[in-house]
Image: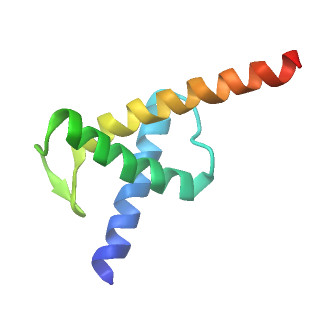
Amino acid sequence: MIAFIWSLVVGGLIGWVASLIVGRDIPGGVIGNIIAGFVGAWLGSLLLGNWGPIIGGFAIIPAILGAIVLAFIVSLIMRAMGKSRRTT
């Protein structure tokens, strides 16, 4: 149980760091950060493998890079959705 909670905390921190680097908040607050951390870790491990320090089951450097990519894509989608709402 402690390992699961630790994974949630580390995933949330990864998502939060990615949103700070991208300069856009991830929708969903804390839950969005946790999801972005988990999906970013998965994406980063697919693209870069599992290297670097591992904390809470996450290879930190690929996880942060994957979460940055995810946060950037989400911000582009949210920006496009905002523009489409204004034009209709």
Residue 37, position as x, y percentages in the image: 39, 50
Between 69 and 16, the one lying in front of the other is: 69
Residue 54, position as x, y percentages in the image: 16, 55
| Tally of numbered discs | 0
When the figure is inspected, residue 57 is found, relative to residue 48, above or below; the finding is below
Judged left or right of residue 61, residue 52 is left
When the figure is inspected, residue 45 is found, relative to residue 35, above or below; the finding is above
Between 10 and 36, the one lying in front of the other is: 36
Q: Furthest residue to the bottom?
A: 1
Q: Residue at x 37, y 74 (%)?
A: 5
Q: Furthest residue to the right?
A: 88
Residue 35, position as x, y percentages in the image: 47, 54
Q: Residue at x 39, y 64 (%)?
A: 9
Coloring applied to the structure: rainbow
Q: Furthest residue to the front?
A: 88
When the figure is inspected, residue 23 is found, relative to residue 8, above or below; the finding is above
Q: Quadrant of the C terminus?
A: top right
Q: Quadrant of residue 44?
A: top left
Q: Quadrant of residue 63?
A: top left
Residue 52, position as x, y percentages in the image: 12, 44
Q: Furthest residue to the left?
A: 51
Q: Quadrant of the N terminus?
A: bottom left
Q: Residue at x 44, y 31 (%)?
A: 21
Q: Quadrant of residue 8?
A: bottom left
